[in-house]
Amino acid sequence: MENKPPYPLRSVDNALHLLQVLRDQGGLRVSEAAAELGTARSTAHRLLAMLVYRGFAVQDDNHTYLPGPALSAPSLLGGPRMQRLRRALLPHMEALCDRVNESVNLMVRVGTQTRFLATVESHQALHVGDRQGTILPAHLSSGGRALLAELDDAQLASLYLIEDASSTAEPRDTSAEAGDGKISTADFQRLLEGLRGVRKSGYALNLEATEAGICAIGKCAVDRSGQVIGALTIAAPTPRFPRSRISPLAAELRLTVERARQDIDPHIM
C-alpha cells in the first residue's frame, strides 16, 4: 500500500474515497457517505453532487447514489494523443467561441458514448457551462450524431441493434436504453433516418435531447488527410437557439473545421 502524501488535500481524498466506495459497494446514501468520511452530511452531499456533475455518480429515485457512466465506460486509449488533439484544437475553439459568443466543446466517440474532452465557455451571463469529462449517449448528442454519421449502416447495426427476441431462445431487453447501449429495432430505424439527414446537411443537432433548456449543433473535425478525429459542437441555451440561427452557426463550424484541419497532423491520433 502506498504511503499517504505528506500534504494531502482533504476534499480530493474524500472524493476519491467515495469513488472507491461506489465502485466496491455499488451505491450509498448521503448519510452513509458522511459516516464513511466522518464529515457533516452537507459536506458529503456537496462531494456527491460534484461526482454526479462529472458523470462518476447518478442518483436514483430513492436518493441513493450509484456508479455513473464515467466509472463504467471504456477508457480512452492514448491519453497523450488526446492531449495533443486538445492543444491543436483549443485555439480554434476559442476563436469560434469569440465569434458566436456561445460555449464550444470538443467531443470524441467511444463505442455508443461520447466524451467531452474540452470546453471553451461563453462569457455571457447565461451560458452552457463546462462539460469536460461528461459522457453522453452518442445517438442523442450533436457531436455523437455527427460522428455516427461517418459509419455505414452495418457498422451502426453492430453498435446498436438488438436482435429480435422472437429469433432467440432467450428473451432480450428491447428497451430504448439497454445497459450496453443497444436500442430497439424501431429506434434504430429512426436513428438511421436521422443520420441520413446529418450526412446531407453536414451537421447534427441536439434539440434538448440530453438536457432540458440546452440545444447544440455539431460537426466532425478532421486532420489534414481528411480523417475524422472528433467533433466540435456549439451549445447554447434554448432561447438563443432559434431555427433562424442554425445555418449561421453551421457556417461558423464549417469555417472552424477547415481552419483547424491545417493544424492537425494525420498522426495525431
Image (cartoon, rainbow, N blue to C red):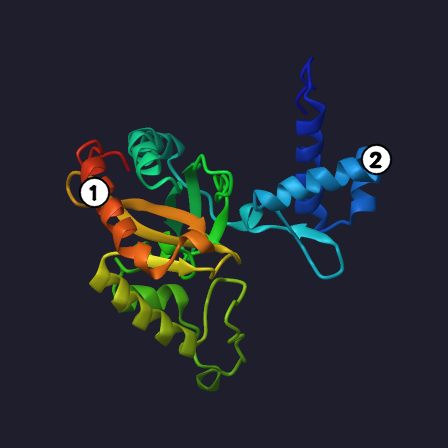
Residue 98, horizontal then vertical, whole percent: 34, 34
The quarter in which the N terminus is drawn is top right
**Residue that appears at 22% across and 47% down:** 254
Residue nearer the viewer, 63 or 2: 63
Disc 2 residue crowd, few under 14, some 14–19, many 20+, Cα 10 Å:
few
Q: Give the residue type at disc 2.
A: Ala
Identify the residue position indicated by label 1 in the image. 255
* Residue for badge 2: 40
- Looking at this view, name the residue that lies furthest to the left: 225
Question: Image quarter for residue 193?
Answer: bottom left
Amino acid type at image mark 1: Leu
State which quarter of the image contains the C terminus: top left
The residue at the point 45 percent across, 70 percent down is 183
Above or below — where is 183 with respect to 205?
below
Name the element at disc 1: helix
Q: Please indicate whether residue 212 sits to the left or right of residue 10 in the image.
A: left
